[in-house]
């Protein structure tokens, strides 16, 4: 039984769920599939129980995709494939085709909408409509799924459940209701119900994808340097996780724990006792859609503060927690009356390891300090490029992209521009976007899109740099401390002595003061403690070489500045500590 659930109701729920499972065409609700665990071998076995269904589905897909490809080829023969009207029409036809083919293909379209290495920009923009504009399924079918998952009639749990869904997505749709016994002013919930027959469709489609991948694997290895079967399995594993709402309930709980002490972020409560594999019940969020500028102004919400809070929350997810919302489009992000940013729909969530987060910090500093060969090395470490790639041949192209994107100041930075230019670079060099980083791109693009809707002059990097500076100064993690030491010290002279870069110290402190990330740490105390320890190291001459590590170009988010005389290093550390206290 799930948390808070009595044994009787759990037994009833299990019996009804088992009964429903036996009625499906292939009994896909096998124990190996129920936990949201992706198992390619089990999928193949289940699909082959009905080979006629596999053939029929393959024929349906082949006909739809083949017709679209033939139309595109005719456009090419006639020399009109680049015409604006033709491109718009074909991109719309592609989106409609994916919707018609069902949830798995909608997810493919959503993934392609954030893959500049695969699809052109104008098609990407059209496919973005798949994020929140998907036709709903009939309500009676949703009520039947609710009965099976809850183990009782929905009216015994929910009062005033909406007659029609208030939102619809690729894998499910949402109803608004109220828990039985709750007051009129409390207990409103959002009830998400999975699409009927979803697992049946996913098993067939993933099986077909894997067979096609096997056929193309040798060509892919020779020409693209990657294993397509692995790519399909990455996609399938993520899809399997999203299709299990018990996993999503766990994501909500983890997000709530991460942001528990952040006064700027609201994560809804999840009701585990009224949730299951195909149903999830969570607190209803009453707020203004994050792109509704007029609505925010009517509600008296500070738009600039909300925008900063949103970027800070996204940065904390990516660089501090390593657990981030992969689908923060306007329909999943709301502004609450008190100015907090609220997230909903946690099905598409991904993680970053501590090593990946460290490399991303380094990448930020390398970009800001125009160290492009080091930036290419960061891409190798993150899996975008294979080890051994010619870094020097890629660095000039990378430099052109970032110089153009930054313009004359950091206020000119635009992440959409970066993505568009990066998409062209993908076809010139052997880049591959790892699955989780396609979600990072997607999350950042959506966040920037929301910010620009609210304030066209907003620059996401103006919030990112103060956040990164504060983390560098305050994070006690040894890897972050080494990164900080490599920034504030530079090895100079023939003897390679480490010299304190006073201007960088001042810039870091001033930039960090601008950060408003909702963390409870006291920045002044952290800086004072750091520089007191640094002064001790400088006076005693111990610990500094170990902290700096092997000689390397110091990655810095600030322009290089002249170093003070070596004799002034200890005094500079003392002054910095005093300045921070002030």
Image: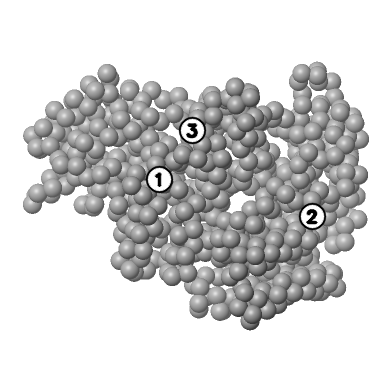
Kindly tell me whether residue 474 is visible in this rendering: no
Residues at badges 2 and 3 in contact (C-beta under 8 Å)?
A: no
Q: Which residue is mark 2?
A: 198
Circle 3 residue: 308
Q: Disc 1 vs disc 2: Cβ atoms closer than 8 Å?
A: no
**252 or 510, which lies in front?**
510
Give the x, y percent position of residue 466: 38, 35
Q: Residues within 10 Å of mark 2 (few under 14, many from 20)?
A: some
Q: Residue at x 45, y 60 (%)?
A: 421
Question: Which x, y percent locates residue 344?
Answer: 66, 37
Q: Is residue 333 above or below residue 240?
A: above
Is residue 173 found left or right of 549 in the rendered image?
right
Quadrant occupied by the C terminus? top left
> Residue 451 versus residue 352: which sits nearer the camera?
451
Q: Which of the two labelled residues, at mark 1 and mark 2, occupies the earlier sequence position?
A: 2
Report the residue at 52% width, 46% height from top.
444
Label 3 Cα crowd, 10 Å radius (few <14 / some 14-19 / many 20+): many
**Which numbered dot is residue 412?**
1
The label nearer to you, 1 versus 2, is 1
């Amino acid at each position: 039984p799930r948390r808070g659930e009595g044994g009787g109701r759990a037994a009833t729920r299990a019996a009804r769920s088992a009964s429903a499972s036996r009625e499906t065409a292939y009994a896909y609700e096998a124990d190996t599939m129920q936990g949201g665990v992706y198992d390619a071998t089990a999928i193949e076995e289940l699909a082959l129980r009905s080979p006629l269904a596999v053939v029929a589905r393959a024929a349906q897909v082949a006909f739809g995709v083949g017709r679209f490809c033939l139309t595109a080829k005719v456009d090419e023969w006639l020399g009109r494939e680049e015409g604006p009207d033709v491109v718009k029409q074909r991109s719309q036809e592609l989106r409609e085709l994916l919707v018609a083919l069902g949830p798995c293909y909608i997810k493919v379209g959503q993934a392609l909408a954030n893959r500049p290495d695969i699809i052109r920009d104008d098609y990407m923009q059209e496919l973005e409509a798949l994020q929140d504009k998907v036709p709903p399924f009939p309500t009676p079918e949703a009520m039947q799924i609710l009965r099976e998952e809850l183990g009782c009639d929905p009216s015994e749990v929910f009062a005033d459940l909406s007659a029609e869904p208030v939102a619809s997505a690729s894998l499910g749709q949402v109803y608004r209701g109220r828990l039985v016994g709750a007051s009129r002013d409390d207990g409103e919930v959002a009830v998400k119900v999975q699409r009927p027959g979803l697992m049946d469709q996913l098993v067939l489609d993933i099986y077909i994808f894997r067979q096609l991948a096997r056929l193309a694997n040798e060509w892919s290895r020779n020409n693209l340097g990657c294993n397509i079967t692995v790519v399909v399995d990455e996609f399938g594993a993520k899809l399997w996780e999203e299709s299990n709402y018990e996993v999503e309930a766990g994501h909500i709980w983890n997000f709530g724990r991460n942001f528990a002490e952040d006064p700027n972020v609201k994560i809804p409560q999840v009701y585990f006792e009224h949730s299951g594999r195909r149903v999830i019940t969570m607190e209803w969020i009453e707020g203004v859609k994050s792109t509704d500028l007029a609505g925010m102004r009517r509600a008296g919400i500070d738009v600039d503060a909300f925008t900063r809070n949103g970027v800070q929350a996204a940065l904390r997810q990516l660089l501090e927690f390593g657990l981030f919302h992969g689908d923060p489009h306007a329909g999943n992000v709301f502004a609450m009356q008190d100015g907090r940013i609220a997230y909903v729909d946690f099905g598409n969530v991904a993680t970053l390891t501590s090593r990946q987060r460290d490399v991303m910090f380094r990448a930020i500093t390398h970009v800001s300090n125009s160290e492009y060969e080091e930036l290419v090395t960061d891409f190798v470490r993150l899996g975008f490029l294979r080890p051994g790639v010619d870094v020097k041949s890629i660095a000039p192209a990378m430099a052109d992209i970032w110089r153009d994107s930054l313009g004359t100041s950091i206020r000119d930075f635009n992440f959409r521009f970066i993505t568009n230019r990066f998409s062209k670079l993908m076809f010139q060099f052997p880049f591959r976007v790892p699955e989780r980083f396609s979600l990072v791109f997607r999350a950042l693009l959506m966040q920037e899109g929301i910010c620009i809707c609210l304030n066209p002059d907003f620059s996401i990097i103006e919030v990112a740099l103060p956040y990164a500076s504060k983390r560098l100064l305050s994070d006690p993690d040894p890897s972050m401390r080494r990164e900080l030491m490599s920034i504030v010290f530079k090895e100079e002279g023939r003897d390679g002595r480490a010299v304190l870069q006073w201007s960088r110290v001042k810039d870091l402190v001033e930039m960090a003061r601008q950060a408003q990330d909702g963390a409870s740490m006291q920045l002044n105390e952290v800086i004072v403690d750091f520089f007191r320890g640094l002064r001790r190291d400088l006076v005693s001459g111990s610990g500094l070489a170990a902290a700096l590590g092997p000689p390397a170009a110091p990655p810095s988010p600030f322009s290089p500045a002249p170093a003070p005389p070596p004799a002034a290093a200890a005094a500079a550390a003392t002054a910095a500590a005093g300045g921070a206290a002030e």
